[in-house]
Amino acid sequence: MQSFAEASKVGKEFMDSGLKSFAAVTTGLQTISVEAADYSKKAFETGSAAMEQLISAKSLDEAFEVQSDYLKEAYQGFISQATRIGDLYAEMARDAYKPFESAAAKVK
């Protein structure tokens, strides 16, 4: 009877850890979704502003300058966002694994 009680306790701990892990993944995915939506909105606004500037350019040189500035800003924004999203995924993975650390240590 003792081993059944211990097995039940370990099973409950793993179930609790699984629920905590699922909550961490859900929260992480929500954060990533909000971040992606914000980036998309900002990228659209930046692209629209660049297009307006491009249309109102008085010369070919000015149009090239607007295009060049936009591409540079878009590239830097993308790299920054990709780094941020990567960090959020890494943080989500750490948070999802954290509940299992103590339970896994007890099994060893």
Image (cartoon, rainbow, N blue to C red):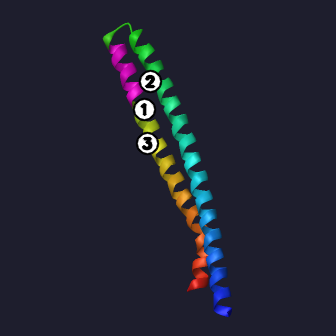
The C terminus sits in image quarter: bottom right
Residue at the outermost front position: 1
Q: Quadrant of residue 19?
A: bottom right
Rendered residue at 54%/52% (across/down) = 88
Q: Quadrant of residue 61?
A: top left
**Which numbered disc, 1 or 3, marks the residue that appears first in the sequence?**
1
Any magenta on residue 98?
no
**In the rendered image, which residue does mark 1 sit on?**
74
Any magenta on residue 62?
yes
Q: Secondary structure at mark 1?
A: helix
Residue 97 versus residue 14: which sits nearer the camera? 14
Residue 25 versus residue 15: which sits nearer the camera? 15
Whether 74 is drawn above or below 103: the answer is above
The type of residue carrying mark 2 is: Gly
Disc 2 or disc 3, which is closer to the eye? 2
**In the rendered image, which residue does mark 2 sit on?**
47
| Alpha carbons under labels 2 and 3: distance apart | 16 Å
Disc 1 or disc 2, which is closer to the eye? 2
State the extent of the magenta-drawn residues as a range. 61-71
Q: Secondary structure at mark 3?
A: helix
On the image, the x and y values in percent for residue 79 come to 43, 42
Whether 104 is drawn above or below 69: the answer is below
**In the rendered image, which residue does mark 3 sit on?**
79
